[in-house]
Amino acid sequence: MAGTGFWPATKLVAEREIKTFVRLKGFWITIAVLLVGLFAAAVLPALIGGSNTSVAVVGAEARQLLTGTSSLDVRDVPDVATAERLVRSEEVDAAVVPGPRVIALDDPPTDVLAQLTTAPPVDLLAPAAVSKGVRILVIQLFAVIFLVFGMGGSAIAQSTVTEKQTRIVEILVATVPVRALLAGKILGHWLLTVGQLLVLAVAAPIALAVGGHSALLDMVAPALGWYVPFLCIGFVLVASLWAVAGALVSRQEDLGASMGPVMLLVMGPYFGVVFASDNASAMTVLSYVPFSSAVAMPVRLFTGEAQAWEALVSMGLLAATVVAIVLLASRLYAGSLLQTGGKVALKKAWARAD
């Protein structure tokens, strides 16, 4: 490598990483899996039905409307107040009361309305800015994309330990500054991630149209405007940790142990956002935690639960954390990259960087 300065060396390493990985079948398989997952998330909810919808019924008139509906779980209750209480507590999905009227919590119960002999008005007790089905779809897409790209950063760890195991790293370090090697790997994989995002951006409108969610693109566009920069910044955070995980070991067989903590940091936000999506307080906390904010904050912006200033604060916290983690990772990477003979302790890697 001719250039030994930091930025020329960083560029050369980034080019090397990109050329290496675009030749791998796994890279293209990942893109294919992302596209299949995108189309599946858009289409499958409309094809797969869930369990029977539960309906509370008040009076003989309301019961008459449900005559012959076998796919509904009908529950007789004594009065409208009881029906409303059951709907609010989500013990039933909807209620049919005298009037006749249909009562639901946040979304019109289309499966109930489709089976009634007449179409009565619908009263929503807590109207939602975004329907539950659309909310679930967006959360799944944001969380899965973050998970895939976050786990994709493990390629940095694998390439690092391969270079150590084959002793190529000794040749690289002789001509390239160690920190430039780290920066080049992160930059190269960051560019690969951006490229994959562009592919998804082209495919998303097609998938939404096929799934009958054409209007969703206009609704989710503002949140995507935040999600993409959050994801790009968050990837640098995770990538630096993957690089350290690879530098701490000398053999592929030992890589699993050092990758474990990073995998938890990547998978934790996925499960946290998916399982806490209905808990406003939990989502608020997750939207300010650097490792989960890349998913939680765009979701809250999409549902109208967060303001732009909150996103700016969250992104600032994420950017500050990235700077701190990259500086820490740079020191650990430099102190452990040339160490062989088993796993390197963090304390030893820190000391060796002096």
Image: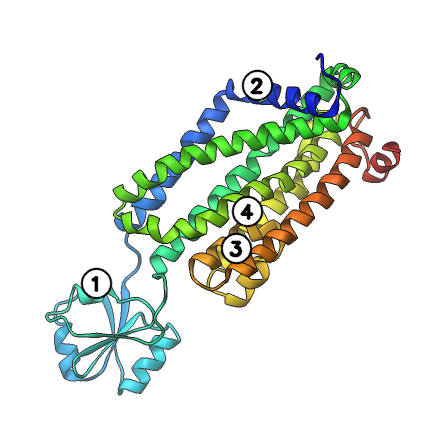
Q: CA distance from mark 2 to mark 4?
A: 26 Å
Label 2 or label 4, whichever lies nearer to me, is 4
Q: Tell me, yes or no, whether the two marked residues, 3 and 1, touch with CB atoms within 8 Å.
A: no
Residue that carries the numbered disc 1 in the rendered image: 71
Q: How is the image coloured?
A: rainbow
Query: In the drawing, does residue 139 fall left or right of residue 282?
Result: left
Secondary structure of the residue carrying tag 1 is loop
Residue that carries the numbered disc 3 in the rendered image: 296
Q: CA distance from mark 4 to mark 3?
A: 10 Å
Q: Say how many tags the image has.
A: 4
Residue that carries the numbered disc 4 in the rendered image: 230
| Nearer-N-terminus badge (3/2) | 2
Residue that carries the numbered disc 2 in the rendered image: 20
Work out whether residue 199 or residue 221 is closer to the camera in this orientation and state it: 221
Label 1 or label 4, whichever lies nearer to me, is 4
Picture quarter with the C terminus: top right
Q: Amino acid at mark 3?
A: Ala
